[in-house]
Amino acid sequence: MNLSFDNTQNAFAYKSTPDLKKAKFLISVIQNPIMVSLATKVTPLLMKMGFPINGILRNTVFKQFVGGETLEESARTAKLLGSYGVQVILDYGVEAKEGESNFDDVTSHIIEAIDFAATQNNIPFISVKITGVASHILLEHLNEAPRLRSGIHDSESENASWQRVRERMYAICDVAQEKGVGILLDAEETWIQDPIDRLAIELMKEYNKEKVVVYNTYQLYRNDRLHFLQLSHRLAKEGGFLLGAKLVRGAYMEKERDRAIKLGYASPIHLNKEATDKDFDAAATYCISNKDTISLLLATHNEASNIAIATAMTNLSFEKNDQHVHFSQLFGMGDHITFNMAVQGYNVSKYLPFGPINEVIPYLMRRAEENTSVNGQTNKELVLLKTELARRKSSK
């Protein structure tokens, strides 16, 4: 196997030189924690006050990390990616507001996105956040219910609210199954994750009988997730359904540790990156070793993890485009992985959020903060951008 992520010509072929220069500037800014902290505080405030900053945002962070404001705009981005053999995970990136009517509205947008994805040849998945269709407070209460009430939740109003959440998710999955589109359920913080996990198993039992429609997300920076993945697989085998597993390292590390300290309980997060890496790679290996009953989506920017699973696929005589294994990176980052894997013929996608610019600001601010906390990643991105710009300049 000769998989390499060093070819910047492949990595950035889809970007013009002016776009590369903008990306280089943006990543340079994101490397500065002070600038990012200031921007994440000031930007929402300026927008609330009516300052005309949409144009600046649209041509910088929005263009770098978001597919478009509408499905139509996202279609152009998806088509561009598809021309380079890259698939798309579409995500309605609007952060949900509390209230049943808002949850119903998000459900409608997700179903619209599924209908749209079914008309495209390179959008196999839609990402769904349960927090978009369910109250955060409801999820938190249900998360405690098994411990506080031996699994019996005694609030009639909350039981009714949860039933509406289930109905929304069944409506989404009905359409997804009919249209042949996969549903990726996002993972959340530990204090609301348990009801999401239970719902994920319920939906997989209903929709994953013949092929995988529903995937749950496993955050391997949690010290219990490798075991939970194996438990999920056992439940799938016992229940006669297939397991869909999206593996990520995790997105809420600082928040999880801070809350554990504040409330005086043991942190659910691994003590160090090495332990996280070990569990992540073990989980990925477990999935491909059981590909007859598990479909894997490996969502990571870690080069070593991607190469390890690609190598394991070769050793196990998998085809590069085996339907049970899919790789993914965020739109706007990790292009050296995505596009070089696409050239080699692997199933690889970009996670592509879309939505009105003023509504996806929380997503964009979170993306900037996450990139700042992963300094090695942004350093690598910057080096690659500089390398490709230098290559283009020298080839003139």
Image (cartoon, grey):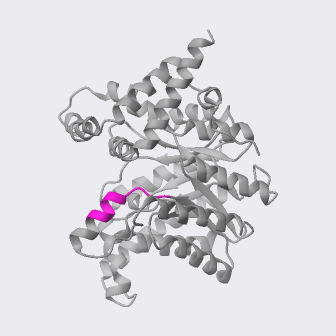
Q: Is residue 119 above or below residue 180?
A: above
User: In the image, 173: left or right of 92?
Assistant: right
User: In the image, 10: left or right of 98?
Assistant: right
User: In the image, 86: left or right of 364?
Assistant: right
Question: Residue 168 location, x and y as percent?
Answer: 47, 64
Question: Residue 381 location, x and y as percent?
Answer: 49, 35
Magenta stretch secondary structure, dominant: helix
What segment is highlighted magenta in the picture?
249-258
User: In the image, 289: left or right of 365?
Assistant: right
Q: Is residue 139 above or below residue 130?
A: below
Which residue sits at x=49%, y=48%? 91
Residue 66 visible here: no
Q: Is residue 249 above or below residue 333?
A: below
Q: Is residue 27 above or below residue 221?
A: above
Q: To which quarter of the image does residue 42 belong?
A: top left
Q: Of 300 and 82, which appears nearest the observer?
A: 300
Question: Residue 131 location, x and y as percent?
Answer: 39, 61
Question: Residue 129 location, x and y as percent?
Answer: 44, 58
Q: Which residue of the protein is positioned furthest toward the right in this rendering?
A: 317
Q: Which residue of the protein is positioned furthest toward the top in this rendering?
A: 396
- Say whether residue 263 is magenta: no
